[in-house]
Image: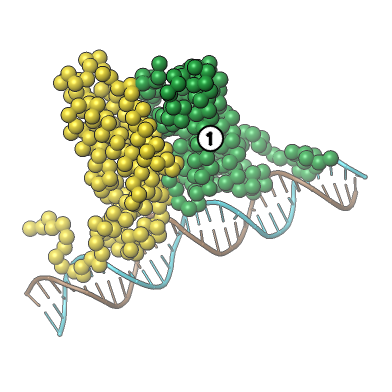
Chain colours: A green, B yellow, C brown, D cyan
DNA sequence: CTAGTTCTGTTCTGGCCGGTACAGAACCCT
DNA sequence: AGGGTTCTGTACCGGCCAGAACAGAACTAG
């Protein structure tokens, strides 16, 4: 009884909701939350406003869906990196992933979660808050992974998981800013390598 | 024979142009270029639109003036740091300055040049470009200083000034993002210290 | 076929955006 | 005093914003 995601009755949707979300994600990625107007979004999605509202609710909910997709797609490196066997390998994979993701040729430069809403007017506040949470979550998962590494003896006893996680996140954010400024993948990977020079041995 | 900055004749300006610019800078700092509306700006400046247009030209020129003031005021650490005697001291002073500036209690969190316009709509493009230039300039001056350090034997022969400068800039940007996410000065200084662990000896 | 449901395109809204026109106020110089 | 100049306040502009109303189209279930 009930709980169908998609209704079996009524006029069928005339567009691919997944593809439309992908396009919307790219627009948010390039222009940020407030910088992306409904006209920009629906234009890229190939639908009109009414269809967008029917399918996603409103602009903010569309953004949340797009962010979710971002986390499962382009930013999945942040999760996959945690599976590396050592803390060093995790950090390296994380930074390598951030370099690749922020300099893809088929997507905007930079990181959606950084560009999305660092500063904004009042309308952008909800987006800003959800992005702050998103970034903090990513840091917390990294910290947890490093804590495990200490427990396993992979990191020295006196290493601070929180400190290392914050450091790696910070470098990742910095890489995103540099990518948005137009730096290429080679320069950024060099930065990532430099950042690992001080890693505990 | 002309060239007067301020006219000697006509009704005198009814507000302190310097103080108004200071207020405008803070609004741009907190909300970014596009996020700061003329209503926000003139409200904080204590004047109305007409006066702002008469004094500064338009929103973009006001932003440029505010950015200039930012460089000479809150962000002057970037220049002062270059005067430190060693490359390590320069890097440390630069990061320390970025931590302090992005976590001042009397100013918005974060860095104006990062928050101002990372991503934006079409209207924000000029601001975005001027900020990219600003950030690149800061990196170039750091690189030049490190190059001198190599010449002086202060840094090892095989050290890459460009690489080190980009790394320090990247960490500075990352710190700015973290500050905007609400991190406090102690956490950020710890990050800065961590970032220096890999510095060439 | 009809009724019910859902999607689509057009049209409209009130509000805010950056920017301007204009009249009057406040000053200097003669 | 009077003219020239510059600043200030009000009122206004077209344009875009996010969002809603509504009619009709396209489907399923009976």
Q: What element carries label 1?
A: helix
Q: Residue at x 78, y 44 (%)?
A: A10
Q: Is residue B199 visible?
A: yes
B110 versus A143 height, above or below: below
Front residue of A75/A198: it is A198
* Furthest-front residue in this view: A157
Q: Residue A139: x and y, percent? A: 49, 32
Q: Is residue A77 visible?
A: no
Front residue of C16/B145: it is B145
**Quadrant location of the C terminus of chain A in the rendered image:** top left
Q: Residue B91: x and y, percent? A: 27, 30
**Image-quadrant location for residue B189:** top left
Q: Residue A133: x and y, percent? A: 52, 40
Question: What residue is pinned by disc 1?
Answer: A137
Q: Residue at x 16, y 60 (%)?
A: B6
* Furthest-top residue in this view: B158
**Image-quadrant location for residue A195:** top left
Chain of the residue that carries numbered disc 1 in the rendered image: A
Q: Residue B31: x and y, percent? A: 41, 49
Q: Residue at x 50, y 49 (%)?
A: A125
**Quadrant location of the N terminus of chain A in the rendered image:** top right
Residue A70 left/right relative to B136: right
Q: Residue at x 17, y 18 (%)?
A: B153
């Amino acid at each position: 009884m009930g709980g169908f995601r998609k209704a079996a009755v009524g006029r069928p949707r005339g567009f691919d909701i997944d593809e439309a979300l992908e396009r919307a994600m790219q627009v948010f990625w390039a222009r940020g939350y407030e910088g992306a107007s409904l006209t920009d979004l629906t234009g890229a999605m190939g639908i009109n406003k009414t269809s967008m509202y029917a399918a996603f609710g409103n602009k903010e909910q569309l953004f949340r869906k797009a962010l979710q997709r971002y986390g499962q797609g382009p930013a999945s490196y942040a999760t996959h990196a945690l599976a590396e066997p050592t803390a060093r390998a995790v950090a390296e994979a994380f930074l390598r992933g951030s370099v690749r993701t922020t300099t893809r040729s088929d997507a905007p430069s930079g990181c959606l979660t950084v560009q999305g809403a660092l500063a904004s007017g009042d309308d952008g506040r909800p987006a800003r808050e959800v992005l702050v949470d998103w970034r903090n979550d990513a840091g917390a998962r990294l910290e947890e992974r490093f804590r495990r590494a200490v427990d396993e003896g992979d990191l020295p006893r006196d290493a601070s998981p929180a400190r290392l996680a914050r450091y790696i996140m910070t470098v990742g954010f910095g890489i995103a800013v540099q990518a948005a400024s137009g730096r290429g993948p080679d320069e950024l990977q060099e930065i990532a390598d430099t950042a690992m020079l001080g890693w505990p041995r």
